Amino acid sequence: MACRSNCATQDHGSFGACARAANIKVSAVMVSPQRPMFDRTKTELSAYDAARRNGIQPEGTTLTKVKAAENASRALGRPYNADVDPPANMIVNKDVARFVNAGA
């Protein structure tokens, strides 16, 4: 038996013949020139998702903004929230964040 386990006919002479008959295709993203963009997007969105699961609200989904929000969270001692906190790149310690928020 040379066919794939889920072959409907199970009458092919080889595994290759069975695969050709099934018309299996490689995902277009995996062989396209846009692969680096796909990989970068996947990395950035997984970092954003991890930040959100930790209660952090970054200013955007790019890796730079997510890392800045994580650094701001460490400096603040609490999860950073871009909706109410000053820009993440301005937060270097708790005192600076308190001073920036005082005017709001």
Image (cartoon, rainbow, N blue to C red):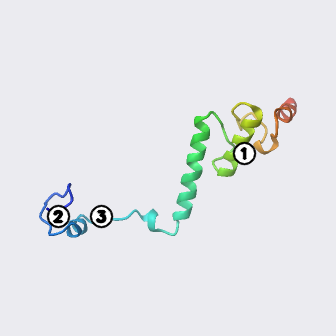
Choose top left, top right, bottom left or bottom right for residue 4.
bottom left
Against 26, residue 59 (above or below) is: above
Residue sitting at x 54%, y 53%: 42
Q: Which residue is mark 2?
A: 2
| 45 sits to left or right of 90 | left
Q: Which residue is mark 1?
A: 68
User: Residue 69: image x %, image y %?
Assistant: 70, 42
Mark 1 touching mark 3, by CB under 8 A?
no
Q: Which residue is mark 3?
A: 24
Counting residues from the N terminus, which is met first, the one under dot 2 or under dot 1? Answer: 2
Q: Secondary structure at mark 1?
A: helix
Mark 3 or 2: in front is 2
User: Residue 73: image x %, image y %?
Assistant: 72, 36
Whole-angstrom CA distance, mark 3 to mark 2, is 16 Å
Whole-angstrom CA distance, mark 2 to mark 1, is 54 Å
Against 99, residue 8 (above or below) is: below
Residue sitting at x 37%, y 64%: 26
Give the amino acid type for the residue marked by disc 3 in the picture. Answer: Ile
Give the amino acid type for the residue marked by disc 1 in the picture. Answer: Ala
Counting residues from the N terminus, which is met first, the one under dot 3 or under dot 2? Answer: 2
Against 7, residue 92 (above or below) is: above
